[in-house]
Amino acid sequence: MGHLSNDEFFTKLAELFDSRKGKDHGHIFLTQKRLSYDQPPLPEPTSDTILPDLHPPRPLPVLIRATNGKGKEDRAKKIKLSTVVDPEALPAFFERYADVCKAGMATLKPRDRSKRKTKAKKKKTTTAAVGA
Amino acid sequence: MPHYAKSEEWLRESQLLLEARPTTVSSPRPFASICHLSLFPSPFPDPVQTRITTKYAIKVPKVRKPKTTDADADNDTPVPTAKPARGSLTFKTYDPISGVTLKYRTSKAAEVSRLIMCLGKLSRPMAGLPELKDEIMTDAPAGEGEGGTPAAEKSEAAATTSAAPPAAQQQTPAGGGGGKGKKKKGKK
């Protein structure tokens, strides 16, 4: 499957998260790594740079994948998404990525505000007592 | 396989791993050609990249069977499954050749956006870009934990300096922010 453009990837990823909404089980896997396939070859290692991959002559793109982890007998239901992010687009991409993930991961524990509320209540009661 | 309790530790270790080994085989060609000639299959067919896998898992928490004295009661009452599904988020940095695995797990929604921005930070060594010099940013929350008042003063000062250039309309929210800071001081 070919790579999606970044915009398509986000819409599909949102759909993928939505497909798990309201369900009580399931997984979504997100992977990221350097894309070194089909890229200009790295310079040969020299005595100065034994590992040329540490400092590539130009920054390499990053491959992002998303899947619902279906395999084996469920392979027909498998959803695989992938996109390539250029090094210049990384900060903007991850900002949108964070928004999509935050919206999609609805079953995570929400921030616990009960403690703060009880604290506030306590304060009110104490001040009332002082006033009276 | 270390499981880190703090996301900062996981971020730091992952950063070091990715900086040290963004791909595991630096020069696959000579290696591969030698291995093709030999009887053994090539152990390094391609450069292998260190990857970060984020697993978002939704599961129903296990319901403990209530301990009942008589067996008949079990059959009549169905097990209550009122508990809502709980999600968890696991971040894993993995280098396939050396087998280094660094993990961090959370179930808090409040951490999601921060952690995804961590992924963004970690994508820089992946892409081969130098690390951003934002050490001041990362140091700020630590300082806040140690001494509350100087950090509050700093933020207040930042608010006033940032609000100073624009017109008078924006001064009212800045004043409100300053007031908040003062209140906090009073509390402490």
Image (cartoon, coloured by chain):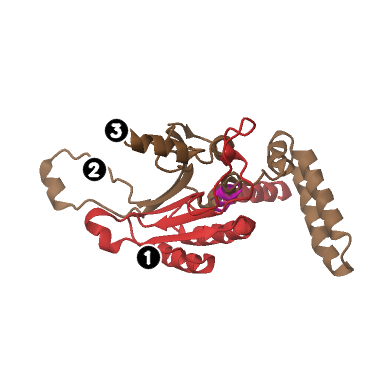
Q: Nearer the viewer, residue B101 or B91?
A: B101
Rendered image quadrant of residue B71: top left
Disc 2 versus disc 1: distance between alpha carbons?
Answer: 31 Å
Residue under numbered circle 2? B65
Do dots 3 and 2 share one subunit? yes
Please name the amino acid that badge 1 sits on: Ser
Indicate the position of residue B163 as horizontal and vertical percent values. 84, 59
**In the picture provided, is B13 more to the left or to the right than B129?**
left
Disc 3 versus disc 2: distance between alpha carbons?
Answer: 57 Å
Residue under numbered circle 3? B39
* Residue B56 tag number: none
Indicate the position of residue B180 as horizontal and vertical percent values. 76, 52
* Residue A19 tag number: 1
Q: Is residue B118 magenta?
A: yes
Q: Residue at x 78, y 56 (%)?
A: B177
Chain letter of the residue carrying label 1: A
| Disc 2 crowd, CA 10 A, few/some/many (<14, 14-19, 20+) | few
Q: Nearer the viewer, residue B105 or B22?
A: B22
Chain letter of the residue carrying label 3: B
Please name the amino acid that badge 2 sits on: Lys
The magenta-colored residue range is B113-121
